[in-house]
Image: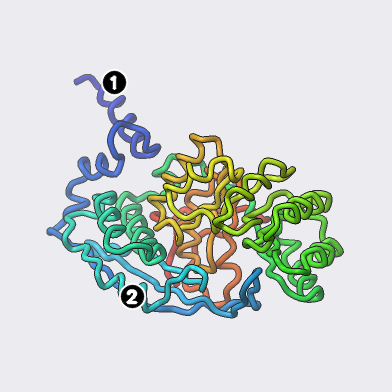
Amino acid sequence: MSQSRRTFIKAATIAAIGTGIASGNPLNLFAQNNKKTVSLNGSKMKLSFKPYDLQLRHVFTIANSSRTTTPVVLTEIVYDGITGYGEASLPPYLGETQASVIEFLKKVNLEQFSSPFELDDILTYVDKIAENNTAAKASVDIALHDLVGKIMGQPWYKIWGLNKDNTPDTTFTIGIDTEEVVKQKTREADPLYNILKVKLGRDNDKQMIEAIRTVTDKPIAIDANQGWKDKHYALDMIYWLKERGIVMIEQPMPKHNLEDAAWVTERSPLPIFADESFQRLSDVLRLKGAFTGINIKLMKCTGMREAWKMLTVARAVNMKVMIGCMTETSCAISAAAQLSPAVDWADLDGNLLISNDCFSGATVVKGKMRLSEATGIGARKL
């Protein structure tokens, strides 16, 4: 074989691993070319987990609830001396608890698989253990992706072929509160972020916006959290909000009311994104026409593998894509941030709302997501 031929094949292999668009799975290609790396001493994957409670900096209020803490479960997958980290975040509306997540994870047997590079097989198996339990499944998915990325020596945005310079600004969330508290939260956030996100859906929506507009004229995204029950009221609110510098609306109507959601979206002067209406991959095509775009959250879709598939399908049917989060540590936020160079909107501030983050990773610099150079999901345990 000539030198030029060998050089070409080497370059093509590197490109295939980097972009993930070559025939076959780039993870399998890497594993085949690096057998010693992925099968040392017949190692087996070991899954461990523990509960952890996140402490919120402020009371967090949305249309139908308030809280000061968020329970999570932190996971680790160890293989051949390398540790991948994951997380299940459990806000009340998700329907999972630390106890339910731990009970699910006790059923997960990763030792039956010979290599973490069997990612599709492993995560298909995990998904079939029980219905729902999406945050529990995400905690395994994130840890597994972190592990595989570390073995490959690459962060996932590079494995997916993304340019980290294309990350969008992230919104910073201001929950429902009194006018004075809302103004104070806005003053704190205004110098640091280029776009704010405001929770609406109660009877003081206009007062919230008017209070914020006394402090800043920056763009605002709105999350109504299903709080507007009448489609005509919702549309009137959207027009009123547009006049005040609002740039997008998230989940204005109850999640199962797709007919009214489609009616609002068709007439809205602003893009409308699905959140509570959107859960798993099969929902993408079902929501086409009812919403302008989708809000992908790892805790709802079982993790990074399905999130990437969602993004791909949404782009294929010309839907906008947003990457969002729960209240999370920098572990899950950094995992979600790996997809951020490929989306239109980012709402990855969950780690910024807590006072006891136990990871470092993706950060926000001048309002823009900045991805860590660390391998895997780009998070490091503190």
Percent position (x, y) of residue 163?
Answer: 51, 41
Query: Can you tell which quarter of the image residue 214 is in?
Result: bottom right
Taking depth in this image into account, of 151 and 203 the one nearest to the observer is: 203
Q: Can residue 295 be seen by looking at this rendering?
A: yes
* Side of 145 where 312 appears, left or right: right
Note whether 226 is above or below 282 in the view shown: below
The answer for how far apart the CA atoms under marks 1 and 2 are is: 54 Å
Q: Measuring 37% from the left and 34% from the top, which residue is drawn there?
A: 21
Mark 2, Cα crowd under 10 Å, few <14 / some 14-19 / many 20+, is some
Amino acid type for the residue under numbered disc 2: Ile
- Indicate the position of residue 235 as horizontal and vertical percent values: 74, 50
Q: Is residue 149 left or right of residue 59?
A: left
Q: Is residue 271 above or below residue 42?
A: above
Residue flagged by tag 1: what amino acid is it? Ser
Residue under pointer 2: 102
Q: How many marks?
A: 2
